[in-house]
Amino acid sequence: MSSDRTPRSRKEVTSDQPIMPLTPILKKTSLLMSPTFHKRVLFNTNENVRSLILKYIETNDLSHINNVLKVLSTSGSQSELIYWLSQMTECVSLLDRRTDKLIMEFLKIPWYKSGELAAAADNFIITLVTAHNYYAYPVLKQLFTFLVPDVDEDDGNLVKDAGLLTEEEDSFCQRALLSIVSIHNHVPMSQDNLLVIARKCMPYFKRHVHQQAVYTYNLLHLASLLPHLRRPLLEIIITNMVTIDVHTPRSELAVVDEEEEEDDESSDEEIFDMDVEDSKEKQITSAQDSSGVTTEVSHIMNHKDGNTLDVLMAIMLQYVHDVCHGIKKPRRSTKLTKDSAVRLLTEQLIDGQSVCQEGKVRLSIDDKRSIGCACGGIEHDIEALKLLFTELKEVFSQIILCTQFSSHVQFLIFYLIALRPGLATIFLEFLRIKKFEDPNCSRDVRRNAMAYIGSLLARGKFIPFSHVHSCLEIICMWCNSYLDNQERVRATNYEDLQLHSPFYSACQTVFYVFSFRYREYTENSKKLDLARSLNLERLVLSQLNPLQVCAPPIVNNFAAIARRFQLAYCYTIMENNKRLGIPSGPMDESKCIVQTTLDMFFPFDPYLLQRSKVYIANHYREFDGLPEDIAQKEDIIEETDEAMDIIISPKSFDFTYGSSPGFRKLQDEPLSIQ
């Protein structure tokens, strides 16, 4: 009987005490300042923490604790919060699986408002996860939720200053990140959970741009604290950016840009014709760097998802630039307004030392080619640059290369290669050997790999002519070898897109790159001989008939250039292809339509994001246009029905394939073959 009375008497003593005397007392400021109050509260807290835990284990009722934690979260002083953490640390042995809800509610209190409080919270968390490692997942999840800020959707400043935090908010995030790192170091097996949670806590791609920017920056900072996890963290970030990218088609961005231009023109006409330049300055800030290159930075984009992608690209491009220059910790973005150009084109200091500025380039002697960033590679951290290139190449291979309609995210690898042009050879060889020529890769991957090769050779202002010719020579050799094999087999030596897709992709790349950089091939007779050595005529006249399968605009421009310089004669074959393409009978709608033309996908088409464009513009090659004599003497007349493919005038075509498979710029008048 005595043994039965003992627990009962303890229960009675415990029940006689108030559950939480802090609730009524905290409302009185005068009592809080009393030293005797703190002594009494801390003594009672020591008893209550243990009793509250035991009562929760017994009843599994969290309601009597929620009010205590709510008051502690909103009104508790730092000394009280630290004391609660110390007592919870002493009671860790009681915090088994039965108290998981209690732990989660306790961790929701913002413990990282000060360094001293964060240290106490970190001590409690480490003690908890080392004693009960099954708490590592929920604790990490709660810490990652702290990295996504709450936003007011109606606050326009958060759109303008996306990614910017106050000093207090930034310190809060940094302390939470340090706790995540501490958990990883003390519980190494939590690494997989950390990556899973980092992916799950990534804001939905339609969420506010400020949340996307802050969380992306925090993951980049976490990557600097845990370098061995940088590649998977970059994969998480880029996967989210690709999702936004594919939901932001180039056609929508182009329409928005056109509408903005029309609005500007109409508003200018209503005021003064002389105010045109002033009104443009309201939308675009233009600055000129020391190399004489003009950089333009625009305002916030009207397209919501496009603006989000623009902000994230600016963060990532700045991160790439910083890592290549030995800056380990990512820098917070500055205000992304029209004054952004001033930041990019003025001298920057980090730790008292000037650094190479984003957006500036070093030009070759003839000013036709960029040869890296402004520092010329002197300030590059070679080891850090190589490691980042390796990791970005792996992420590119797994995510970006497999994505058909990505328009802008791939410019991350473009910019990295632009900073160190020597990497271009490695990247092109990787695409050709590891992807395109590997029969184990899927047809789509092989096609995309060749599209990346062609687009980089055409658009990279940092790619010298010698590299362009070497690549085209290798691709043409592969095509000729492919034709030799087909001529020996004979059974498959006929036009078929599904059967010979890699061959047609290679031919389209050759036609595209040659048309884009034909001026360099025709500068003198020696270079023209290099063009003849490619043996382009064999590709044109082959039984596989690439002129029928490749995209019509590419074929039209190549045909005009090839005839102008007598490299190949394509128009007869093109006319035969059109005649053979005319249906001879009624169409059977019940039969599925088989694709007969290769899709146009050139990933480095013009960059449409306005604010981050400052990183890309000076490394990017625009199409120079075709010779004037071609436009004057070789206009083409279209005599077939409207349903037939239109042959585009070379003069009207600007090599923008972003609106694949169709094109936006067509000449209004029909043209003729002579």
Image (cartoon, rainbow, N blue to C red):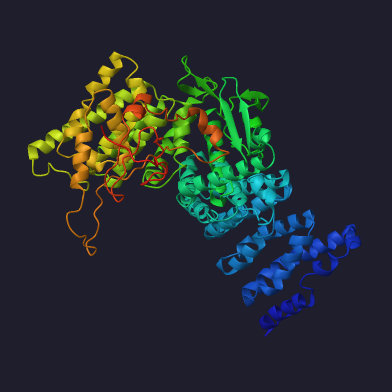
Quadrant location, the N terminus? bottom right
Q: Which of 341 and 100 is in front in this view?
A: 341
Q: Is residue 76 left or right of residue 360?
A: right
Farthest residue in the bottom direction?
1
Q: Can residue 460 be seen in this view?
A: yes
Instruction: Tell me the residue at 87%/62% (across/down).
Output: 37
Quadrant location, the C terminus? top left
Q: Quadrant of residue 38?
A: bottom right
Q: In this view, does 603 lie to the left or right of 480?
A: right
Residue 230 position, x and y percent, is 49, 41
Q: Is residue 97 left or right of residue 534?
A: right
Q: In which quarter of the image is residue 341?
A: top right
Residue 293 position, x and y percent, is 56, 24
Total numbered badges shown on the rendered structure: 0
Instruction: Tell me the residue at 87%/60% (across/down).
Output: 32
Q: Nearer the viewer, residue 558 or 249?
A: 558
Q: In this view, does 438 lie to the left or right of 615?
A: left
Residue 292 position, x and y percent, is 57, 21
Q: Which of 115 and 593 is in front in this view?
A: 593
Q: Is residue 377 visible?
A: no
Residue 106 position, x and y percent, is 66, 62
Q: Is residue 202 above or below residue 674?
A: below
Instruction: Tell me the residue at 79%/66% (across/down).
Output: 44
